[in-house]
């Protein structure tokens, strides 16, 4: 649910909406029975209120199964869940190791590894394979959070702060612009 809410939304805004959503509907069964318009009213600050139907359908499926799937295939079978959301859920929710690639983290990986592609991050098999190779066997959750933090604080889209980057010595992008 959190990953669906985080799509194209800021984490701070999602945190408020997430709390309200689960205060009103504390479990999948309750959310699955909610009126779509009621869900939409809660998630409206995020924009894209069309997510309300996805959230309700997802809740119904989880309730029908009696649990949130703990594998990639099961998660991707849920409405609104693609590879990124499935893997992020595996890493954060279940403590499993999985590559996590979105538009923000792709910037870090592509720059660091010197990968060039016109494909969107979520559809670039070379990028996913490379991220799978560099993601450590242990502490996968912390690794992915660190990459997100690096992307949001240092490896910025237009003006990367390479001088502040702990990876600058081995970064393909930094060596090109130096």
Image: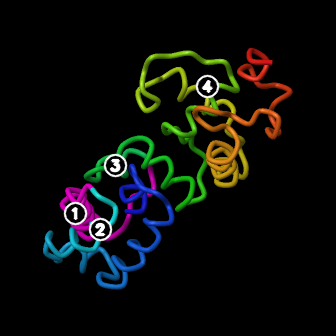
Q: How is the image coloured?
A: rainbow
Q: What is the x, y in percent for residue 123?
A: 41, 27
Quarter of the image where the N terminus is located: bottom left
Report the residue marked by disc 3: 81
Mark 1 lies on a secondary structure that is helix
Given residues 173 and 78, the one toward you in this image is 173
Quadrant placement of the C terminus: top right
Horizontal and vertical percent position of residue 108: 64, 33
For marks 3 and 1, the one nearer the N-term is: 1
Residue bearing the label numbered 2: 43
Residue with the most extreme front position: 159
The residue where tag 4 is placed is 110
Q: Residue at x 38, y 72 (%)?
A: 17
Labels 3 and 4 touching (C-beta < 8 A) = no
Mark 1 in CB contact with mark 2 (< 8 angstroms): yes
Q: Earlier in the sequence, mark 1 or mark 2?
A: 2
Q: Earlier in the sequence, mark 2 or mark 3?
A: 2
Q: Secondary structure under badge 4?
A: helix
Disc 3 crowd rating (10 Å Cα; few below 14, some 14-19, many 20+) is: many
Please identify, in this view, whether the residue under mark 2 or under mark 3 is nearer the observer: 2
């Amino acid at each position: 649910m959190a990953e669906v809410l985080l799509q194209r939304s800021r984490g701070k805004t999602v945190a408020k909406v997430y709390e309200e959503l689960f205060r009103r509907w504390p479990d999948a069964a309750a959310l699955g029975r909610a009126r779509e318009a009621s869900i939409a009213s809660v998630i409206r600050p995020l924009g894209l209120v069309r997510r309300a139907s996805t959230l309700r359908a997802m809740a119904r499926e989880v309730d029908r199964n009696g649990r949130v799937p703990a594998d990639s295939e099961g998660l991707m079978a849920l409405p609104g869940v693609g590879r990124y959301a499935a893997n992020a859920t595996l890493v954060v929710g279940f403590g499993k190791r999985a590559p996590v690639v979105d538009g923000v983290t792709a910037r870090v990986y592509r720059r660091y590894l010197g990968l060039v592609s016109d494909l969107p991050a979520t559809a670039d098999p070379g990028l996913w394979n490379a991220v799978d190779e560099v993601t450590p066997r242990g502490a996968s959750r912390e690794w992915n959070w660190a990459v997100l933090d690096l992307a949001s604080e240092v490896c910025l889209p237009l003006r990367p702060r390479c001088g502040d980057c702990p990876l600058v010595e081995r970064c393909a992008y930094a060596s090109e612009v130096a």
